[in-house]
Image (cartoon, rainbow, N blue to C red):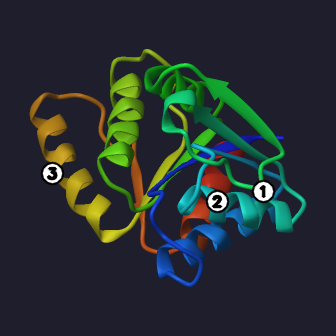
Amino acid sequence: MATITVFGSSFPKPGDKEYEDAFRLGQLLGENDFSVCSGGYQGIMDAVSKGAREKGGEAIGVTVETFNSEPSEYLTEIIECDSLFERIKTLVTIADGFVILNGGTGTLLELAVIWEYFNKELIKPRPAVAHGKMWNNIITEMENRIAVEKRKLGLIKTCGTIEGCVETIIKLVKD
């Protein structure tokens, strides 16, 4: 079973559009025989785990001791890390693909790490899809810069719908 790591904010609550989008993402991934992996706490991480579990999927949470937060109740597996850097490395290495949802500086860091690892060929590029207007703007600006540097373009895809993200992930992971 392939694993999709989902990056996103810890702030959305049930009923918020971002939470419900992540819940739907988890459902669709679970229905299509994917495990989900996330940072393991609340917000988007909780929602994607809940959605995947509801559809019979596995939900892996990668937590870090220093956060002193309660992990999502929907996790089937918890991987505890000693530092934020170890956590990010684990989130990246466990994944067969990535979905990046709305978030703040932590999510931006996670996106930057996978993008840089792909560009520097530190890991084999894997399917990565970003959802949301914020990412469209950031990715467009970065692609312009990457083009000037004559590096590989198109490593991070963008998609306007959750369903489109899942369709893209399915197509790219199975290729």
Q: Secondary structure at mark 1?
A: loop
Q: Secondary structure at mark 2?
A: helix
In the image, 62 versus 138, the foreground residue is 62
Residue 175, visible in the rendered structure: no
Q: Return the mark for residue 74.
A: 1
Q: Where 77 sits versus 164, above or below?
A: above
Q: How many marks?
A: 3
Q: Are marks 1 and 3 in contact (CB under 8 Å)?
A: no
Residue found at x 68% / y 41%: 61
Residue occupied by mark 3: 141
**Horizontal side, residue 58 vs residue 37: left or right:** right
Q: Secondary structure at mark 3?
A: helix
Q: Amino acid at mark 2?
A: Asp
Residue found at x 49% / y 21%: 83
Residue occupied by mark 2: 46
In the image, 110 versus 42, the foreground residue is 42
Earlier along the polypeptide chain: callout 1 or callout 3? 1
Residue 154 in picture, x, y percent from top left: 35, 44
Q: Specify the quadrant that holds the C terminus.
A: top right
Q: In front: mark 3 or mark 2?
A: 2
Q: Amino acid at mark 3?
A: Glu
The extreme left residue here reads 148
Q: Where 91 sits versus 31, above or below?
A: above
Q: Are marks 2 and 1 in contact (CB under 8 Å)?
A: yes
**Horizontal side, residue 57 vs residue 142: left or right:** right
Q: Amino acid at mark 1?
A: Tyr
**Horizontal side, residue 135 vs residue 15: left or right:** left
Q: Quadrant of residue 3?
A: top right
Residue 155 in picture, x, y percent from top left: 39, 40
**Other residues around mark 3 within 10 Å, as few (<14) / some (14–19) / many (≥20):** few
**Other residues around mark 2 within 10 Å, as few (<14) / some (14–19) / many (≥20):** many
